[in-house]
Amino acid sequence: MKDFFVDLHVHIGRNGQGRPVKITASERLTFAAVIRECLVRKGLDMVGIVDCACTGVLQDMRVLIDQGELMELPEGGLRHRDRVTVVAGAEVEAVEESGGVSHHLCFFPYLRNLAEFSKVMSRYITNMELSSQRCGLPARELQAVTLSTGGILLPAHAFTPHKSAYGNACQRLGDLFGPGLQELPALELGLSADTALADHLAELEGLTYLSNSDAHSPERIGREYNVIRMHAANFRELALALHRTAGRGVVANYGLDPRLGRYHRSYCLACQAPVQVPPPALACPACGATDKDFVRGVLDRVLSIADRDAPHSPPHRPPYHYQVPLAFVPGLTRAGLDRLLQRFGSEMAVLHQARSEEMQALVGRPVTRSIMLAREGRLPLQTGGGGHYGRVANRPPTGEQLPLFPAEPAQELS
Ligand SMILES: [Zn+2]
Ligand SMILES: [Zn+2]
């Protein structure tokens, strides 16, 4: 057994023809660029690409296979140069009769499964060239289609306010999936939640938690990731790990401090301010706004539907490690980032292993101090909400600085 670094939620911005796939994703995010980023800068062993059922992307994958850049593994998954394994998947939007909308990740072992899924879904989705399209099916029917075409389905960013299972479609996954709940191997926590928060819900006890990046640009790949113990990086092993069978499993989650996520606390759009009262806040304490003018925070939502007063983790739950991605570190410039990556090899190595003295020589004392404080969980943070990321407190408003997740409209809610 070996431990693998895995991020299972990465989007594609443009297909090989230069046409948009995920409209809100960076145009630099092509299939080839994702692989390069995993390999060179992030140090990821396995990446789930969630726009593979889009017609142009399927085509790109076939070309890469023909060129020998991707190889379909007998156990499922696609290997690039014996270094990175791609798990091909789709993020699809389900709609309930009540109008509740939720996103789900569907993963498939082989291209033929994916093509079959894509074919079935084309009956329900108007534009198969684009990502995360609404399919008109409720979650349990989407799950049935996924299973019948040989895939696995898991709820994406399960608590975010506008497009997620708990945020918008249900109070209990059991209501959304019925008996299909037993077929869910895992659930994606999303950037604004962590294990402790999710463990307020008893029905999640049997599910594996995933911490994935939902990257819309190359820089964001791996801002959350999982360490998965398995025999090899392929689809079959991944499925075993998600079901925690035969010694396989997620052994650690690395995620943002949930306060840095964009939906951690409730936010009033009328007052343009996050709520300051203790959770759960389900209406604006200042102006009374609810519904349309009020974006329910993940913390507020979970505590309002929790069936436990305090989190209770089952014994199989791995540790959840907080990390502050380098893009959040005040004062770190693009040139500084490049120097760090060149010296230490990957963002993960900088965040978790690089020695303070060595970093100081490359990026100076204040930046190094922030990275070290972040590593110890002692960097002061300001909580995010309403679509605005949290931030490192006292971050200087001006000066040279890496763009903090650029070009991401507040309405892009995945
Ligand atoms: Zn997504
Ligand atoms: Zn989404």
Image (spheres, grey):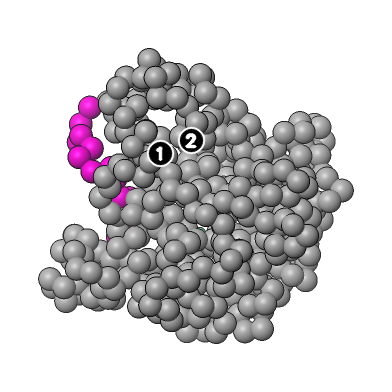
**Residue 155 pos. (x, y %):** 56, 66
Tell me: residue 279, above or below residue 5. Answer: below
Q: Residue furthest right?
A: 74
Q: Which mark is residue 352?
A: 2
The yes-or-no answer for disc 2 within 8 Å of ligand 1 is no
Magenta span of residues: 386-399
Q: Is residue 1 left or right of residue 301?
A: right
- In front here: 117 or 119? 117
When asked about the image quadrant of residue 188, the answer is: bottom right
Q: Is residue 304 left or right of residue 203?
A: left
- In front here: 64 or 129? 64
Local crowd size for mark 1, using a 10 Å CA cut-off: few (<14), some (14–19), many (≥20) = some
Q: Residue furthest top?
A: 361
**Residue 215 pos. (x, y %):** 50, 46
**390 part of magenta stretch:** yes
Regarding residue 406, the answer to whether it shows in the image is no
Q: What type is the residue that disc 1 sits on?
A: Arg
Residue at image mark 1: 375
When asked about the image quadrant of residue 393, the answer is: top left
Q: Residue furthest front?
A: 315
